[in-house]
Image (cartoon, rainbow, N blue to C red):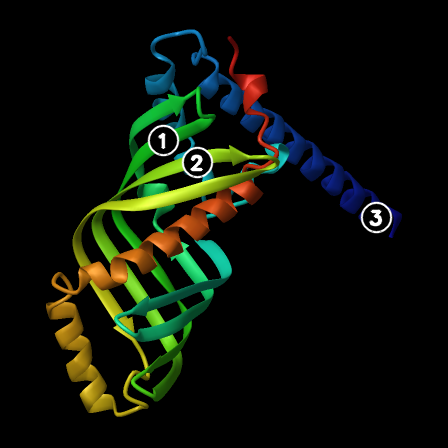
Amino acid sequence: MHLINYVICASAIILSCSQMTRTEGEVEVIQNIFSPCKKSSPDFDPCIKRAFNKLRPYFKRGIPALGVAPFDPHFAKEVKQRRSIGGLGYTLTLRNVFEGGWTQSTVTKYKTDWANKRIIYSQYFPEKWLKGEYEFKGDGFGLEMMRTGQWNLTLRDYSQTTRIKRNGSGLNVHVEIDHIGDMDIHVGNLLLGRHILEQMLDRIINFTWKPGFAVIRPLINDLVSTAFTDIWSNSFRNFPLDEFIKN
């Protein structure tokens, strides 16, 4: 019995030491990624762009030693959008939203706006996917409509530009879509479970999404902006970037 306890104790110590070694190694790797980037250098922005792209393997597992949580996929508890168009108003609430594709993304442009304390960068995703639950409440011309169900969205050949600005202790994050090559969207229970009609409507929506893209573009912007706000405010809140980047 004493031998078994000793083996268990020794194994736990070895595992703990291995974890500490891995953690220390990851911190050293991150330091090496950012160490070439000097604020006074004209190559600072391209250097940060290269550094961000080298961080992609950590999107799925995070960097616990630096307080960075995994965010591929990212999870948002709730995203709400209210709109009024030509007397028609609606409230769309998306819940339990998962968003993936970050690890395959590439930062294509990066710019530091020192005067306004913000950064601007563009990012390309071969594919980005989102899924969750929805609740739609609409009213117009004295009529009310409510729907709930599941939804999913896949964006291909997708690019966006993100603007991040300090706001006291928090961050303002705004994302704008630059390009979408293709898109699939599926929304359940639009016709209250009439499956054949819903399948027909589903095909029509996906076949004709480009003419109606102006309607859903603000929603996608809101979704992605919310995700980025969560990621930057939570996962990277305590990231010690100043310790890695010198003047």
Q: Nearer the viewer, residue 154 or 233?
A: 233
Q: At numbered mark 2, what does the secondary structure look like: helix, strand or loop?
A: strand
Q: Position of residue 34 (x, y in %)?
A: 46, 19
The answer to whether mark 2 and mark 3 are in CB contact below 8 A is no
Q: Are marks 1 and 2 in contact (CB under 8 Å)?
A: yes
Mark closest to the chain's N terminus, 1 or 2: 1
How many residues crowd mark 3 within 10 Å: few (<14), some (14–19), many (20+)?
few
Q: Marks 3 and 1: CB-CB under 8 Å? A: no
- At 55% from the left and 28% from the top, the residue drawn is 26
SS of the residue under disc 1: strand
Q: Amino acid at mark 1?
A: Ile
Q: Amino acid at mark 2?
A: Ile
Front position in the image: 24 or 10: 24
Which residue is labeled 2 in the image? 164
Judge whether 137 appears above or below 13 on screen. below
Query: Please, what is the three-letter code of the amino acid marked with disc 3?
Result: Asn
Residue 84 is tagged as none
Q: Where is mark 1, residue-wise?
A: 120
Residue of label 3: 5
Q: Nearer the viewer, residue 157 or 9?
A: 157
Query: Which one is earlier in the sequence, the residue at label 3 or at label 1?
Result: 3
